[in-house]
Amino acid sequence: MKRYWMFRKGKFLLWAVVAIAVFGLVVMGLWNWLMPAVFGWNEIGFLQAVGLLLLSKILFGGFRGPWGYGMQWRQRMKERWERMTPEEREKFRAGFRGHCAPRSETENSQVQAD
């Protein structure tokens, strides 16, 4: 059984290395093709391309886990909303308004409530 899991881990690592290499080469090729011609910037090497790829993943994509994770949350919230009574929905909306409203509106509603 351990041999099977070691094989799977090795296979995953191999695919990860291949994917990083391919994406790094694509980024390097696109950069070196476009950026010097369009903006006059210097060409980059492979490690710089992989670093640029990692930086863009951190800044724009984050590390949120597998694809579709947000969709599961959305589906659970939809099911929860459908199970709520109209009174519970209104209470939820009122609580949400208190947290999401601009500060001036929140202060106005608190002043009116007093």
Image (spheres, rainbow, N blue to C red):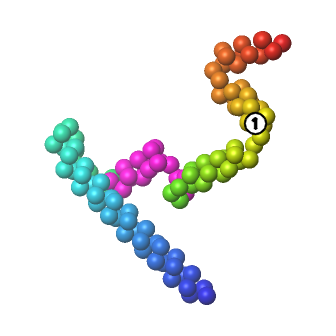
Q: Is residue 59 magenta?
A: yes
Please state if 85 lies on the left or on the right of 25 as rendered. right
Chain part drawn in magenta: 49-65
Relative to 14, does residue 42 appear above or below in the rendering? above
Query: Which quarter of the rendering shows the C terminus?
Result: top right
Q: How far across and how far down the image is residue 60, in percent?
A: 45, 44
In the image, what residue occupies the spot 79% across and 34% down? 87
Please state if 20 lies on the left or on the right of 67 as rendered. left
Q: Residue furthest left?
A: 37
Q: How far across and how far down the image is residue 61, in percent?
A: 47, 48
Question: What secondary structure is the stretch in magenta mostly built from?
Answer: helix
Q: Amino acid at mark 1?
A: Pro
Q: Badge 1 is on which residue?
A: 86
Quick one: SS at disc 1? helix
Q: How far across and how far down the image is residue 81, in percent?
A: 69, 44
Q: Is residue 27 visible?
A: yes
Relative to 1, does residue 45 appear above or below in the rendering? above
